[in-house]
Amino acid sequence: MQLLGLILLLLGGGALAALSQRLHRNAPRWLALGVIAAAALYLLAIPVGAAEQAAWIPRFGISLILAMDGLSYAMVALTLFLGLIAIVSSWSEVNESPGFFQFNLLWTLAGVVGVFTALDLFLFFVFWEVMLVPMYFLIAIWGHEARAYAAMKFFLFTQISGLLMLFAMLTLVYLNYQASGVITFAYADLLHAEIDPGYAFLLMLGFFVAFVVKLPGVPFHTWLPDAHTQAPTAGSVILAGILLKTGAYGLLRFVVPLFPEAALDFRWPAMLLGAVSVIYGGYLAFSQSDFKRLVAYSSISHMGFVLLGVFAWNTVAVQGAVVQMVAHGFSTAALFMMAGALQQRLHTREMGQMGGLWLKAPRMGAVALFFVAASLGMPGLGNFVGEFMVLVGAFQVDVPLTIAAAIGIIIAAVYALSLMQRSFQGEPNPAVAAMPDFGFRELSVMILMMVALVWLGVYPETLLNLSAPVVAQLGFTP
Amino acid sequence: MEGLWLIPALPLAGFLILFVTEGRLPNRAVAFIGAGSVGLSAVAALFAGIDFLEQGGAPRAEHLWTWMAAGPFEVAVGLYLDGLSLVMVGVITGVGFLIHLYATGYMAGEDGYSRFFAYMNLFVFAMLMLVLGDNLLLLFLGGEGVGLCSYLLIGFFHQDSANGYAARKAFVVTRVGDTFMAVGLFLLFRELGTLDIQAAMAAAGEAWPDGSNLATAIALLLLGGAVGKSAQVPLQTWLPDAMAGPTPVSALIHAATMVTAGVYLIARTHDLFLLSPDAQFAVALVGLVTLFIASFTALTQRDIKRILAYSTMSQIGYMFLALGVGAWSAAIFHLMTHAFFKALLFLSAGSVILALHHEQDIFRMGGLWRRLPVPFWCMVIGSAALAALPLTSGFYSKDIILLTSFDYGSGGAWFWGLAALAAFMTSLYTSRMMFIAFFGEMRTEPHDRSGVNMWLPLVVLAALAIGGGWFGLAPLAGVLPDGGVDAAHHEGAIVWVTALIPILGVLLGYLIFGGKQLSVRALVESKAAQGVARFWDGGWGFDALYDRLVVRPFGFLARINKADAVDLIYAFIAAFARRLNAVAVRSQTGKLRWYAANMALGLILALLLVLLVPGT
């Protein structure tokens, strides 16, 4: 029960962190840090391919099935890594009920780890909800000025789309029961369910919408800019770095293998949504004057590549999508941390009130420049590998949509460099008197992310080898 | 000999050291690391070159590791050295080292000394990857890398927004070109299943007949990438603005190396262009149009760096013309001689600018020849080579280009005529620059404070600018289809006319700007001439066109949709739900009689439904 242990460790650690606030107000963050570090060490001891099963609600064919193949391993590793980063990055940001804060953080992470490992549809749905509710609290309680609105919007979008998924899930189980006479929520059994193609298409759509809302793809994206902008830094890091990936993961793990024919029929519209997201996200990113909101819209653009890649349906593109998921996790999380660091120092996110910050904080400038370069797809860094592989694969399937997405890369250069210009370069803003540069804590976290992105950009084989067998199994063409 | 990887790795190491130390090293150490890493890289290149020639010019490949692999898509990080890449490596590390050395003096006293050399080293690394990479994706990496460094160095003095604008313009415009190239790579991979250059070129020759549409499409897409990097029409607009960077940057990036990337790309993939006469003609045409436009524009500029920038555009135009008309080796030959004399011109101009406290307007210079002898004589040599006066390096390379274009098909005379006219203009604007800046009365007092690290590179480059063309370019012989520089032979009156044209240009230049025997005042002050000058100065309308077609519409769209129109859908749903709620709230009146009446009404309706609708 190693995988269950990992999740329980996070859940239990969260509960302890909440209680530990009574001992000392700094206890929760140290405890949370320790829990994540322990979980990360624990993960190293779990082999790729671990799988475990136990009965849970046998009457309805619901069991505790957890498994971790290469793809899940990569995603869980990313989750714990960014979880650690999130705790360190919000080290001095949270003063109000730190215990409950760390509780929510750890429970969200537990939910995410569950989502990445559950192979029982009902269990998956439970974890899907577990990661949602604490995230709602993170935004609603520790968020910025419009947090109530943003949190509610986030909750409604995810909840309504989650309901759609639940409905599709129950119908799938029912149809499978009618065909085979067995009630089961087990992923492995449902893979072979024989469903009428008309139903399959509708059920596929139910899952698809739930995951694309999470991803998010245009036109279901509008919760994201508000949620990201209003969330506290740790919330944004987890939201952008990990939670969006659950949408992409869901497409790969459920939509494609459960409904291969229906999903293949839906290929062109899905790729279209991907390409539109790339362009529209980039275009709106350029329109923004709020640092954090700009980064949020750029996320939509980057995740559009994932959608495009998954539905391009060949190994190159899907592997590219996997790299893009991980690389985007690092680059965007780092930019959100930069936004948080700036807000903590300047008490604003408006770029109109920044400018020339490089002179005051050259380290922050150099770090921002690095992640801006990553974000605009500079070769040698992870995002480039992901985007290029997605485009190479997509081009074999649909030339116009690929070209449209490639134009998105030009737009990425425009918004990313304008972010750099308006915040760190240009004439120094006289209203900004002095600004402390990155200290040891912030810098070391950033360096970790930089090393990760360079590694992904220069030797993505580490990740590609991990996910290759999985991608081959999911049913994509070579 | 193993160890090709050392050539790019040394500048990369220099960059990493300077990056990690965050500018805490003393300037002497920074200079040592910054220039030294490139110097060592040049030594490594020298050894590789000697080794290469001793082996009889056999290409060498070095596989380092698998970069990315998925399904049929597999790209390696591997290096490939043949005569073509050897020439490029020699120019990049050799000229690059001299410019780095010069910059140790030029940048002394500027803030961000360490940052400057970090960027410069990163640039040299990227450029070396571009010419040494054995596959097109590494070439792409190098291209984007030099684009990034160019962005960083143009905007080096980042507190000035104008520099930032020029830097972003350069990056975005070249990225438009890169995107064409990327699409070309997608298509190439789809058709041939590889991005390895040697494998792809061999496969292309087998798979496609002459004049194949696919070959044309891919060649044109690659040309799109080449015109972006090399500042050719229609993506030339970024180069004049790029002069915002410090002068050694202009010498290294915007004259000697990065802008030649497009020429290298086309020469490297020449098999594709040979398959497609149409694409090759397009290359020649792009070169011709660019060299023509740029040589005229240079005549109206006042800023010495902008004059040199336009001259770079036009000289690279000659290289494109050469590639297009099949003078492959001459294109690379001119690339090399141009690197010598253009680096020399920019660095000497830099010395002048520094001595005049950052004055760049040639009309505020004048009479400097006595006071700044070293920069002056170096400028004279560089200008002579730029104008292609006989016996200078530029003469040999440009001569072959002009003569080969004369032999080019039925339109050869036209190609020759226009290129020769531009050559005449080149010597005219070059002599204008020299006579106005260095002769006549002195308008600004110079203070020369250059040390040995600044004049030594000038002297070496001056020697190369004269003698760099005397011995041809042996390593190219086996690589390019025309059999090397020495293979070209031309005879007849055309040879003499071609050689004479630059001399005539200089003579006219002397008569107008030197001895002032000829006055062009009436011409220059006429309304028509002023209008033409304005048109040329604005880059022949390209900037205005792009501004109207792309920049402003995009800005407008961005402004009107900042709040994201898609969100209106959800806002509408939310508002609708609230309105429903308001209606429902209104029904809750608290009057018992009202509730009872509604209940009775509902009951009646339900009963009616049961009675009237059959089957319920």
Image (cartoon, rainbow, N blue to C red):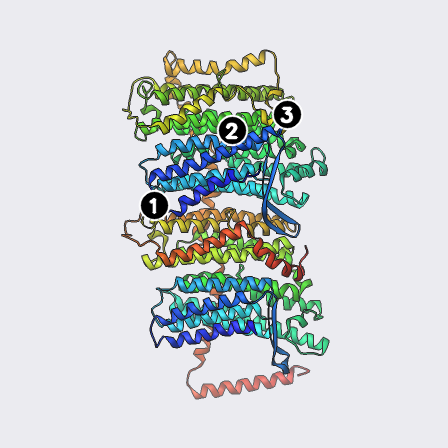
| Crowd class of label 1 (few under 14; some 14 to 19; many from 20; radius 10 Å) | few
| Residue B521 figure quarter | top left
Among numbered discs 2 and 3, the one appearing first in the sequence: 2
Q: Are marks 2 and 3 on the same chain?
A: yes
What chain is tagged by disc 1?
B
**Is any part of residue B548 visible from this angle?**
no
Among numbered discs 1 and 2, the one appearing first in the sequence: 1
* Screen quadrant of the C terminus of chain B: bottom right
| Crowd class of label 2 (few under 14; some 14 to 19; many from 20; radius 10 Å) | many
Q: Mark 3 highlights which residue?
A: B482
Q: Mark 1 highlights which residue?
A: B24
Residue drawn at (42%, 86%) of the image: B591
Q: CA distance from mark 3 to mark 1?
A: 52 Å
In the rendered image, residue A214, in percent from the top left (x then y), is placed at 53, 64
Q: Amino acid at mark 2?
A: Ile
Circle 3: element type:
loop
| Crowd class of label 3 (few under 14; some 14 to 19; many from 20; radius 10 Å) | some
Q: Nearer the viewer, residue A56 or A213?
A: A56
Q: Mark 2 highlights which residue?
A: B316
Q: CA distance from mark 1 to mark 2?
A: 39 Å
Q: Nearer the viewer, residue B379 or A352?
A: B379
Q: Are marks 3 and 1 on the same chain?
A: yes
What chain is tagged by disc 2?
B
In the rendered image, residue A296, in percent from the top left (x then y), is placed at 45, 58
Circle 1: element type:
loop
Q: Is residue A76 above or below residue B424?
A: below
Q: Is residue B559 above or below residue B113?
A: below
Q: Amino acid at mark 1?
A: Arg
* Screen quadrant of the N terminus of chain B: top right
Q: CA distance from mark 2 to mark 3?
A: 19 Å
In the rendered image, residue A447, in percent from the top left (x then y), is placed at 43, 54
